[in-house]
Each structure stands twice: as structure tokens, then as C-alpha cells.
Image (tube, rainbow, N blue to C red):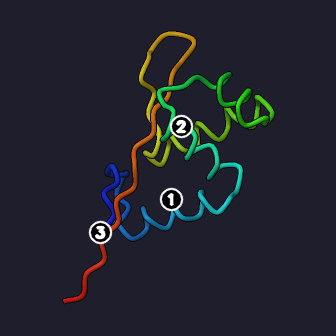
Amino acid sequence: MAHLPPRSGQPPIQQLQTVVDLLETPVLARMYTYILQHGPVTVSEIVDELDIPQGTAYDYVQNLETVGLVEKTRDQRPYEYDAESISLTLSTD
């Protein structure tokens, strides 16, 4: 089972599918990995390190935050974000 934050009424398998769909986008996957390894980071740091457009970075951070993979760690600007690692355990009963 994936250890993901609860989402409004979605069953766990649907939550996992949402995460998989998002991470199939290469830039989004790179962003998540960067935040996971270097967080907390600002969007400006992400833009500089990954050489992606600022608008794209803000959109993708919001997407990652919406599915619970990234959380805002600072409530004042510049906002900082940190990533939650994904833990997946498969079992057969």
C-alpha cells in the first residue's frame, strides 16, 4: 500500500494512480526528485537548478502539492517546499 496523505474521498488505488499519472511527466518527475533530495527549496531555486520556465515550475509545484507529494514549509514569501517520499508495499494474501 502506498503511504500517501488522505484525499477527499478517493480510494487508495485511485490516489496512487493520480501520483503515477503526474510523475509520468518527465519535468514533473525531475522536479519532485529535486525537491525530495534538496528540500526545502523555493520555486526560484527549482527554476535555476532545473532550467525550467518559472510559470511551469509554479504550476507543477501546485500539482505536486495538490496530490500531497509536496508541502509548503514556510507561510511567508518566498515560500519553501519540501517533498514527501513515496513508500509502496505490495503484498499478496
Residue 70: x and y, percent? 47, 39
Residue 72 lies left or right of residue 28; in this view the side is left
Q: Quadrant of residue 13?
A: bottom left
**Drawn side of residue 72 relative to residue 55, left or right:** left
Point 37% across, 51% down: residue: 7
> What x and y, as percent, mark residue 71?
44, 33
Q: Which residue lies furthest to the bottom in this view?
A: 93
Mark 1 in CB contact with mark 2 (< 8 angstroms):
no
Report the quarter where the C terminus lies. Answer: bottom left
Q: Position of residue 56 (x, y in %)?
A: 75, 37
Residue 11 lies in what quarter of the image?
bottom left
Quote the CA–CA distance across marks 1 and 3: 13 Å
What SS does tag 2 mark? helix
Q: Name the residue under label 1.
A: 19
Q: Which amino acid does label 2 sit on?
A: Ile
Q: Residues within 10 Å of mark 3 (few under 14, many from 20)?
A: few
Spatial separation of the CA atoms under disc 2 and disc 3 = 23 Å
Q: Is 92 situated left or right of 83 in this image?
A: left
Q: Name the residue under label 3.
A: 1
Circle 3 sits in a helix, a strand or a loop, which is it? Answer: loop
Which residue corresponds to mark 2?
Answer: 35
Residue flagged by tag 1: what amino acid is it? Val
Q: In this view, does 25 lie above or below 58?
A: below
Q: Which of marks 1 and 3 is nearer the N terminus?
A: 3
Residue farthest along the top direction in this orientation:
76
Q: Give residue 62's mark.
A: none
Q: Is mark 1 on a helix, strand or loop?
A: helix
Q: Which amino acid does label 3 sit on?
A: Met
Q: Residue at x 32, y 51 (%)?
A: 6
Q: Where is residue 3 in the image (x, y as percent from the top left)?
A: 30, 57
Q: Nearer the viewer, mark 2 or mark 3?
A: 2
